[in-house]
Amino acid sequence: MDEVIGVAIAIVVAGVFGGLFLKGIDRKLAAFMQSRIGPPIAQPIYDILKLMQKQTIIPSTSVRWLFTGAPLVALTSGIVLLLYISLSYVCYIIGLQSPVQGDLIVIMYLILIPSIAIISGAFASGSPYASIGAQREMVILMSTELPIAVVVLSIAWHVADSMYNPFALQSLFEYTLWHHAGAFGILGGILLFLAMILVLPAEMSNVPFDQAEAETEIAEGVMVEYSGKLLAFLLLTDAFKALSLSALIVILFFPYTFTGLFGLSFSIGSYSITPLIEIIFFIGKVVIVYSIGVTVIRVIMARLKISQVAKVFLFAVSAISIIGMVLIMLDPKMKMI
């Protein structure tokens, strides 16, 4: 148990720097794709350190306790989300027994909490810009729930006959979505992955789904009145959420370990460094998923109207996920399991 606690602490500490570096890689890669130099990869860390030294201004029109408490709730829930998603998988790849299985239904609720906290803080600020941003955030939040639910149910249905707890993340480590999949199952899995990739930038409020924070329209929207430490907490929440959601997509669709794929182990003298290689391999997959789902999409697309966002997710993305679910259920090889 002491080892698991140590792993949990390491995940939180690594999550702070890893999430911020992930945001930095996103900005650097976007700059490269646009033929710019861009900021240094460590720029998000510099931003946080600078904000922690700045004065925090509380608007006189705000509901003080809710305005100041919302970023703390958002940050705490972001940390819990990362721990709940990553702990069981990290323990699995380094050979420890995790006390947390990672329930997919609980994860769906945990994903909502940071956004709900930010919406509450925006409404409590008393700013009309923040209120408009909060309303837009609610539309995006409700629009993305159906595709996420369909993806979760599809994966749970696939592993239900082979695992006693199909909603546990641990079930996917041994029995992946692609296990015994035929042509229909593979195509269905690709569609589910595409749906989650499209949900990722919306959950992260990135272009083309950044209507809640549109700088040129509503001056940062939900975060317009935040400054100093409270703004730093919101940026840290964003970093934790980026890492968490990317890790979730990796675990849902690509939970394979380096050793499992290539059958290789590594050691220096009598010390095995295979767990370190596995963690690096996992981080690499997270960076690739985030780069595809957020960086590439925001570089090649422009911001949509809020009405278009609802239509995209409630019709197009939901249809993609439902078709993927149907294909998985119709796959004859999966029925034979």
Image: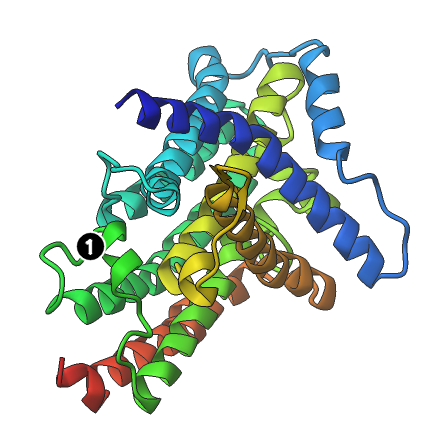
Give the answer, above or below, for where 72 lies relative to 258.
Answer: above
Direction from residue 81 to residue 266 in the image, left or right: right
Instruction: Reply above or below: 162 against 219.
Output: below
| Left or right, residue 304 beside residue 38 | left
Which one is in front, 194 or 170?
170
Q: Is residue 167 left or right of residue 49?
A: left
Image quadrant in which you'd find residue 334: bottom left
Q: Residues within 10 Å of mark 1 (few under 14, many from 20)?
A: many
Residue sitting farthest toward the front: 269
Residue 89's x, y, as percent?
35, 46
- In this orientation, does residue 135 appear? no
Tell which of 262 and 140 is nearer to you. 262
Q: Nearer the viewer, residue 163 or 96?
A: 96
Q: Is residue 3 visible?
A: yes
Image quarter where the N terminus lies is top left
x%, y% of residue 204? 54, 48
Quarter of the image where one finds residue 291? bottom right
Residue at image position (44%, 63%) is 263
Q: Quadrant of the C terminus?
A: bottom left
Q: Quadrant of residue 230?
A: top right
Q: Position of residue 196 (x, y in %)?
A: 44, 63
User: In this view of the protein, which residue sits in the foreground, 281 or 146?
Assistant: 281
Q: Position of residue 256 (x, y in %)?
A: 41, 61
Kind of residue at disc 1: Phe
Pointer 1: what residue? 167
Structure colour scheme: rainbow
Helix or strand or loop: what does disc 1 sit on?
A: loop
